[in-house]
Amino acid sequence: MKKNKKNQTSTNQTTTVARKSKKSSIIWLAVVAIIAVGLLVFCQLFFGDPIGETTTYYQNTSINGIDISGLTKDEASQVVSSTLVKDMANTTITLQSGQRTWQLDGKDFEYVGNIDSTLEKTLAIGRDGNIFDKKKKEKQIKNEGLNVFLPYNDLFGGMEDKINQICQEVESKASSSQIIFNPDSAQMFSIDKGAVGYVVNRDELESEIDKAIAQKSQKIIEIPLAEVVPSTDNEELLKQIGKRSAFSTSYATSSAKRKSNIKKALASFNGMTVLPGETVSFNQTTGPRTKENGYQNANIIIDGNYVSGTGGGVCQASTTLYNALLLADIEVLSAFHHSLPASYVPLSFDAMVSEGYADLVFKNNLDSPIFIKTTTNEQNATVEIYGKKFADGEEIKTRSELIKILPHNGDKIISDKDGKYSNYVLYKGEYYRLKYPKQGYESKGYVDYYQDGKLVESKEIRHDHYQPQMGVIVEGTENLAEGMTLPDNGVKYIPPQKIANN
């Protein structure tokens, strides 16, 4: 009996503990539920309700003047779209700028209805913050109204392109003030003040168009313009312009045709303005040396021989320009020497040009423009370079240095087999000098920089070889008749040159 009583007591204790544990669980579940409800209420009070499919717009809310109060987003989308499509034909906007007008008719554009983004943003207005903020915003909208304008490019396809086109026609670029160079006038340099430009205030224009579409009115909008004032001021630069260099060559003994070619070539550069960093080609500037382009036949050098060719003398024009550029400290990118020394400049300071393989090319390496003036008369050709003045005491000179003479190989005698020179020679032993031998030269060219009369730097810019040329004597080909003698025509054979200590 005692043992059974003890077991009964143990069972009762276990049952009691289980009841207490179940009761505790119920209590904790109730607490968690209360907390969850409290958090939900707290979130609703202080963070607002989430926006869903049934959320409606506040009272007194409209899109483009179309009332959507109390509607859901989907309902509002249908109402707004149908109303806008119906009103499109009645929408006409005239854009005006001065005396010019452009018309935008709603019926000319396709309705695209990209309005979802605007409807979502409008629905979200006043939905954030706590319940007090929401109530305050809701009351404000109800009293003052909320009217949102849809952007025209969300409504009408193609209207944005049309407005862009109109703006391009209205806008004008500002033209900066610039230096005017008139090389042949007494006052070579003057200032063009430039002109004010205009750009469309796009934000203001788009806002006015959006309002006009919403009001469904026949409205005239003056296109809002903003001035663009020229930014460059050349007054100070004008004060700094001076003559940087001048160089002349003589052609007093040249033929009229050769003089004409030199004058024409240099005229192509007269009045030229070369901007900083700009590159200029002599050949491209002068154009083809053809009769059609105004050039005449005169002697040119080919393979050490003077022959007649169109444009003869143009190399003297390029050489004159070349030396003026060097004295102005302008960068020369390419220059070529002749096969024979030029009589009008020292060795290593000629600049041969020939279409297709030899060109004089230079680049304005200064930080301001340079200006080229050319003048010609019956005696001389001159090139002047203007630009920013050299600093006080600065001076540039060029210098030619003869390294050595290259001896010629004397004469060679050729037979006149084709009778080309039959007016001069006919018989064997009868001679005609076609060309004298010429010695060659090795030379260098330098540009020397002076400050207050003292040499501060010397640059070697050229190292040239003018190859010696053989003389040419033509001899006739026919045999003398018996007893016939030829008079001495004075042609003397010249042997190879010997130069001591060369």
Image (spheres, grey):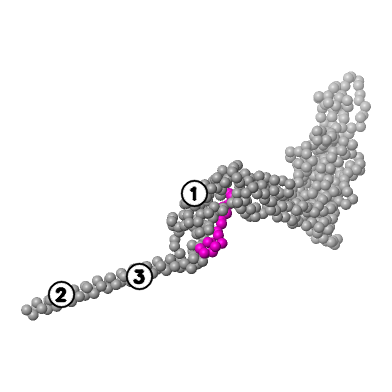
Q: Of discs 1 and 2, which sits in the foreground?
A: 1
State which region is magenta. 138-153
Q: Classify 10 Å Cα crowding around label 3: few (below 14), some (14-19), many (20 and above).
A: few
Percent x, y for residue 406? 80, 44
Residue drawn at (63%, 55%) of the image: 203
Earlier residue among tags 2 and 3? 2
Picture quadrant of residue 471: top right
Residue 34, labelled with which disc?
3
Gap between marks 1 and 2, in whole Å? Answer: 72 Å
Can residue 168 be seen by looking at this rendering?
Answer: no
Q: Which of 449 and 171 is in front in this view?
A: 171
Secondary structure at badge 3 equals helix
Gap between marks 2 and 3, in whole Å? Answer: 35 Å
Earlier residue among tags 1 and 2? 2
Residue drawn at (54%, 52%) of the image: 66
Secondary structure at badge 1 equals helix
Q: Are marks 2 and 3 in contact (CB under 8 Å)?
A: no
